[in-house]
Image: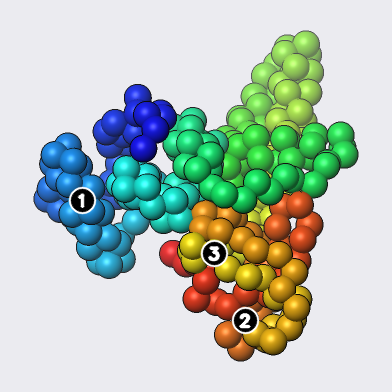
Amino acid sequence: MRKVGLFFLGLAFTFPSLFGQNTARFEKATELYNKGQYNEAAEQYLSILENGEHSPALYFNLGNCYYKQNEIGPSIYYYEKALLLKPNDPEILNNLGYAQNMRLDAVEQMPQTELRKLYDGLVNGLSFDQWSYLAIALMMFCVLCYLAYYFLGIASQKRVAFVTSVISLVLGCTAVLLAYLQYREFVSDNPAIIFAREVKIQAEPNASSESVFTLHEGTKVNVLDSLEAWRKIKLEDGQIGWVKIEKIKLLKDF
């Protein structure tokens, strides 16, 4: 395996909180990882997942374990899951990028308009939770400024307090709107990762239909529809087809 990103892949077990996960198992997995026993370490992490507990750190470390074993599909899958819980994290994005470089499929994203790029940059500038916390903080600041306006006696100070409260209110409402837009996109998006080494994508939801293109493990798709054991998928370049459900693994299965 190429020496790629080992600075980050080394032991990136530095995420701060494990949210009540089984500490003993997590530490055991870390010890196994340090010894180069990546498969055994992954089993320990998976046992924590089976207990119904998950976190960005857990998924990130699982991704590292599978990357070390050249398991492209699982490594990308768990990095992507970590990214869902901790968007824009530089370490997750870095390691995900290295894993994606090992894919056989080079899917180019459809060109975006400048307006769409601006929209995505604004809405995804913060996570849903961060936009929500910012909105709460701004609303509280708005109330404080209004109280200051009410109790202050000097006209110039009252004017500053009032203007500041209005600006805080507008910014708070904007943060609420951005949080809603991001949440709506999160709910409507249904991403999955191809887990089969190679799979033919069909034009219709049956095995006898025409094969429109071929995908390999690790490729990210978006599930649009379902029909019995088939799922309608779309690639970032706009291609659409049908695939058997056992060939993919949904990311939002928390």
At label 3, which amino acid type do we have? Glu
Q: Position of residue 189 (x, y in %)?
A: 66, 60
Q: Are dots 2 and 3 in contact, CB under 8 Å?
A: no
Q: Dot 2: few (<14), some (14–19), or many (≥20) neighbours within 10 Å? A: some
Q: Position of residue 183 (x, y in %)?
A: 64, 54
Distance from disc 2 to disc 3, alpha carbons, whole Å, reads 16 Å
> Where is mark 3, residue-wise?
198
Distance from disc 3 to disc 1, alpha carbons, whole Å, reads 27 Å
Give the residue displayed 22% in from the left and 63% down from the top.
Answer: 47
Mark 2, secondary structure of its residue: strand
Q: Position of residue 4 (x, y in %)?
A: 41, 30
Nearer to the camera, 175 or 187: 187
Q: Where is residue 171 in the image (x, y as percent from the top left)?
A: 73, 34
Give the residue displayed 80% in from the left and 47% down from the top.
Answer: 110
Query: Could you tell which of marks 2 and 3 lies nearer the N-terminus?
Result: 3
Give the residue displayed 23% in from the left and 53% down from the top.
Answer: 39
Q: Are dots 2 and 1 in contact, CB under 8 Å?
A: no
Distance from disc 2 to disc 1, alpha carbons, whole Å, reads 33 Å
Residue 215, label in figure = none
> Where is mark 2, residue-wise?
230
Quadrant of the image occupied by residue 6? top left
> Where is mark 1, residue-wise?
41
